Amino acid sequence: MLLLALILIPILAALAVFAKLPARTITLGAAGINLILGLYAALCPTCAGTMDVLVLENPAISFSLGLDGMSAVMLSLTVIVTLAAALSGSCPDGRERLWYASINLIAAGAIGAFVSTNLFFFYAFHELALIPTFLMIGILGRGGHERVNIAWKTTIYLAFGSIILLGGLILAGIQLEDLSFSSLQPVAEHQNAIALLLIIGFGTLVSLFPFHSWAAPAYASAPAPVAMLHAGVLKKFGLYGLLRIGLAVAPDGMKHWLNLLLVLLLFNILWMGLVTINQKRLDNMLGASSVMHMGYIFLAIGAAIAAGGNIVDPTTQSLTLAASAAVLLMFAHGISIALSFSLADRIEAKTGTLEMNKLGGLAKAAPKLAFLFGLVAMASIGLPGLANFAGEIMVFFSGFEGWSPEQALGPVQITTIIAIWGVVISAVYMLRAFRNTFHGPAADRCASASDLTFAEKAPAILLSLVLLAVGLCPNLLLNLLK
Amino acid sequence: MNSALLLLIIPLLSAILIHFLLQQKMASIAAILGTIGTLVTLGISLSLLSSDAVGCSFNWAQIGDFNVNIGIQLDQLSKGMMVVVTGIGLLVHVFSLGYMKDDESKARYFGNLSLFMFSMTGIVLADNFVMMFIFWELVGLSSYLLIGHWYQKDSAADAAKKAFLSNRVGDFGFLIGILMIWGITGSIVFDQMALSAATPFLGAAVLLVFCGAIGKSAQLPLHVWLPDAMEGPTPVSALIHAATMVAAGVYMMARFFFSIGFDVIPDCSAVTIAWIGGITSLAAALMATQQDDIKKILAYSTLSQLGYMVMAVGLVDPNAGMFHLYTHAWFKALLFLGSGAVIYACHHEQNIWKMGGLFKKMPITGITFVIGTLCLTAVPFTSGFFSKEGILHAAHESNPALFYIAVAVAALTTFYMFRLLFIAFFGKAKDEHAAHAKEVPLVMAVPLLILGLMSLASPWIGKAIPALNDFHPHIGLEMNSVTIASIAAFVVGLAAAVVFYKGKESDPLANNKVMQLFRNKFYVDEAYAILIKIFQDLVAAIVHFIDEFFINGLLVGGLTRIAQGTGNLFRNHCQSGRLQGYATLLGLGAIVIIYIVTFL
Amino acid sequence: MQTASLTEYLFMSGLLFAIGLAGVIIRRNIIVIFMCLEMMLAAAALTLIAFSRYHTVNGLPDYDGQMLMFFIITVAAAEVAVGLAIIVALYRARQTVNTEDLTSLKG
C-alpha cells in the first residue's frame, strides 16, 4: 500500500492544485511526504510490500507494484529530485496551477514507472509523465516562439521512440506467459529483432546517438523543474528498462548488437563531447553534456551484455559489477544534472543571460552560487568525493572485468579505453564554462548580481548533500542493491 | 583509533571548519587553525617514524567480490614522505601567516591549503591504486583552487584551468593503466600486486600508469602547466608546485615499482621513462637560463629536477629518485619561500632585472637563498650533492648517454642559479622598490632559517628519508669519475655565470637567436595553442555543425517535419472551414460507402 | 387507376436527393442550403414510404413506414424551427448568411 500511496499522493496533489488550493504549499508538502515515504520504502523494501491486482485476463496484465534494489535506488532518485524541482525555478505569475500540477504529474508518472513490476504499467506510467513535460515546454518554456517547435520536436521524437519500443515489447510480450517482471525470461524467437527495437526505442528516450538531438534544446528551453525532472529522472527510464527488460528477454539478441551499441555510445561520448565543447550558452552546454554522460551508462550496459546478460550474480545473489555501476551512475547523474539545471536557472535569473561570453567574474558577487556551481561542475567532471566519480570508476572497472593479459583487448575493453578520454573532454567544457562564468574580471551584469537567498539555496543544498554523501560513501547506495 | 588516521582527519576537519564555519569573518582564527592542524600532523608523522604502527582499512565501495578500500599503508616510504609533506607544510603555513596577512580572501586560502594537506596525505598513505587516484584528483582540485586564488586576474584563472586540464590528460593514461594493472595482477592493492614473471601488456600498463606521473610531475610533453602555475601565491608554489604535489608522480612510480617488483618491469618501458625524464630535465634547464621572472626560473628549475627524479625511476633505481625528491623538497621550498620574501619586500615585483643588491638589505633571506642555491647546484657536502650523485651513479652504470645529459644539466643548473643570484641579490639596485627593500618580518624569516638548516642537514636524518627500509644513502666524498664530473659541471656553470652576468645591468645574451628560443620555451605553448585550435576547437565546430544540420536537421528534424507536414496537409486542405467542402466530402464518402456495400 | 411502380418512386426520391445535395454543395446562402437539406430529408422520407407501400405482410401493405413518416415530419418541423432560430442567431452575431464568410470551423 505504501507504493500505491507514493503514486497517489502526487496525483491527489495535482488535483488539489487544479482545484485552486494553494499550489506551492501543497506541492512542497506532497513532495516532502513522498521524500520521507520513498526513502523509507527504499531502505526497507519489505515494509513497502507489494501489490497485485489483475486488470486483464488475456494477455495477463495486472497492476502490480513492488520494490527491489534497483527500483529502490531509482525511487530514491525520483523523490529527491522531485522535492528539489518543486523548490527550483520561478513560476510566472498566474500560471501556478499548470506549473505545480505538471511537477506533481511528472513525479507520479516517474514513481509509477519505477515501482511497477508489470511491463504494461511500466510503459504506461512513463507516457503519463511525458504529457505534462510537453505542455510545460510548449506553454511556459523559454526561448520565444521557438519553444513551441522544440516542444513538438521533443514530443514527436519521444513518441517515435516509444512506438518503436512498444513494437519491441509487444514482440517480446506475445512470447511470454505474463507481463510481470518476475516472469521475464529469454524469449525463444526473434531475439535479434527485439533487441534492436529495444535498443533504438529505449535509446531514443535516453538520447543515444544518433537519436539524441531532441535533448539539448528541450532542456535548454524547458522551465527549470521540468528540465531537472526529465534529465534527472525520466531519462533514466530508458536505461532502467534496457537493464531490466532488454537484458532479461533478449540476452542473445543484445549480444548480437553489442558492437553496434558500443560504437553508438562512443559517438555519444566523443561526438557529443565535442558538440558540448562548442556550445556558447550555458543551458545548451548542460543539455549536451547530459547526452554525453549517457554514454558511460550505456558502457556499463555494454559490459553487462558482454558478461552474459545476467544483472544478478547467481553466486552472490547481488547485482553484478556492471549493473551496479550503471545504477550508481544513473543515480549520480540524475542528481548532478538536476542540480546544474537548477543553478543555471538561477544564474539566468540573477544576470539575465546564459551566454557565456557575456558573463564573467560572477564569483565575486555571488560566492555561494559559485561554490555550488563549482561543486556540480566538479561532479560532472568526475571528481572523487562526489557521486559521479564513484559511478564512473565502477563503470570503467566493469569494462575491464574478466579481462586477463593472456587474451587480447576485447571490444568492450577498447571501448572503455576510448571512453575514458571523455573525462578529459568533460573537464574541458565544464572548466571552460566555470572559468567564463565565474572567474576573470567581473562583467557589468555580474558585478551587480545578488547572491542566492536561502529559498534559492535550499534545493541546491539538498542535492549537493546527496552528491557528497554518495560520493564519500558509495556503500550507502550499493547496500540498497544487495 | 589509529593515529595515522588522524593525519587524514585533522586537515579535512580544518578545511571543513574554515570553509563553512569560520569563513572570511574569522580569517585570523582560520589561519591559526590551519597552522596548528599542520603542526599536530607533523608531530604525529614524527612519532610514526619510530613506531611500528600498522595501517588500517575501511570499505569504501563493495560490489559482490569487488572491493575498494580506503586504507593506510605505513612503511618507510610513506612515513618518510609524510615528514616531508607535513614539515614543509607547516613551514609554508607559518610563512603564509605573514605573506597572506592582508589578503582579502585569507580564509579561503587557508581552507584550500588544509584541503591540499588532506589530499596529499591521502596520496602518501594510500594502500591501493583507486584510493591513490581519488586523492590524486583531489590534489589536482586543491592545486586548481590555489593557483586560481586570485581568480579575478585572467592569467590566474587561465593558469588554474590549464593546470587541471594538463593533469587530466595525464590521468587519462593513468586510469587506463590502473585498469590494466587490475587485469594483470588481479588486484588494486599495492601489497598484493607482486608479479613473479613479466606478462604481456605489462610494459604498456607501466607506461600508462607513468602518464599520470607525466601530468602531475609536469614531464614533457605535459610540462606546460607548471610555469603558468606560478600565478598562485608564492607559498603555494613552494609547497605544491615545488616540494610535494609535483613530486607525487615520482612517489607514485616508486610505490608502484616496489609493489610489482623491479625484476618484471620490461626494459623498453623503463628506458622510455628514463629518457622522458632526461629530456625534460635538459629542456627545462635550457629554458630556465633565459627567464626573467624569479618564480619562473625556479619553476623551470623544478621541472628540471623532477626530470632527474623521473630519470632515476626509469633507471629502475627509485630509491635514488626518492632520495633526491626528499632533499630537493627542502631546498626548493627554501628557494621558493626566499623568492616569496623577495617579492614581498619588493612590492610584488618579480622581474629579476628590477632587483639587485638585496643580499645586504635582506641578510637572512640572502644567506638562506644562497644556501638553497648551493644545495641545488650540488656543491660538495650539501644535500643536493649527495642525492644528485646517486642519480648520476645510476645513469653512469646503465645509460652513458643519459649520464652526459645529466652532467650537462648540472652545469646549466649552476649557470642559471648563479645568474639569478648575481642579478637579484648582488650588484646595484635597479629599481626604486629594490633600493628600499627591507628584511621580512620574523614570521617569514624563521621558516626560511629552519628550511636552510634542513637543506643542509637532511641527508643525515636517516629515519626521515622516504625509501625502502634497507636503503642507506651514500654520504661522503669519494673521488671517482662521477664525482669529478659533478664538480667539473659546477665549476663550468659557475665560471659561465661569472663571465656573462657578474655586475650586469641587462641581459647580454638577450639578442642571441638560440637564447631567444630558450626564452620562448621552444615555442611549445604556441604550438599547443595551435594544436588545440585545430584539433579541439575546429573539430568541435565542424562536429557541432554536422550534428546541427544533418542529425538535428534531417534525422530528428526530418521525422518531426514529416509528422507536422502530414498534419498540416490535412488541416489546410480538408479542414478548410468551408461548409460546402465538408458537405462535398460527406457526399463523396457516402457514395464510396454505397459503392462498396452494393457492388463489392 | 394506374399506380406508379416502386422504381418510379425510387427514381423520384433519388432525383430529389440529388437536387438537394447539389443545392447543399453549390449554394452559398445558408437559408437555401437549409431548404435543400429539407428536400434531402423529404427524399429519404419518400423512399421510406415507397418501400413500406410495396413491402407486403400477409398480403397486405405494411403501414408501419407510413406511420413513421408522420413522426419524421413532426420532428422535421421541430428541426426547422430550431434550425431557423440558429440561423437568425447566427445572422445577428455575424451579420451574414453567406457560408463563404463563416469559416471558423477551420482547424
Image: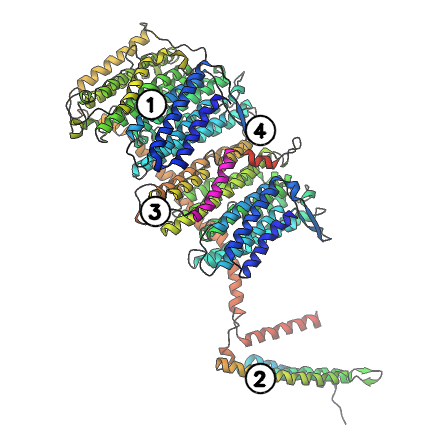
Residue B325 shows in the view? yes
Mark 2 → mark 4, Cα distance in angstroms? 84 Å
Task: Indicate the position of residue B551 as horizontal and vertical percent values.
Answer: 47, 49
Residue behind mark 1: B91
Amino acid carrying label 3: it is Leu
Residue A267 shows in the view? no
Image label count: 4
Question: Circle 1: is it few (<14), some (14-19), or many (20+) Cα within 10 Å?
Answer: many
Answer above or below: position of A247 versus A134. above
**Residue C84 has which mark?**
2
Residue behind mark 4: B66
Q: Residue at x 53, y 56 (%)?
A: A101
Depth check, front residue: B14 or A279: B14
- Give the colour scheme shown: rainbow
Q: Are marks 2 and 4 on the same chain?
A: no
Q: Are marks 1 and 3 on the same chain?
A: no
Mark 2 → mark 1, Cα distance in angstroms? 102 Å
Mark 4 → mark 1, Cα distance in angstroms? 41 Å
Query: If you read the primary sequence from the N terminus, does the residue marked by circle 4 or circle 1 appear first?
Result: 4
Tell me whether circle 2 and circle 3 mark residues in contact (CB < 8 Å): no
- The chain carrying label 3 is A
Select label 2 or label 1 by which is in front.
1
Locate the C terminus of chain B by quadrant: bottom right
Task: Indicate the position of residue A425 as horizontal and vertical percent values.
Answer: 43, 38
Question: In the shown orientation, is residue A228 left or right of residue A182?
Answer: left
Amino acid carrying label 2: it is Leu
Q: Residue furthest top?
A: B479
Residues in magenta, as a range: A447-472
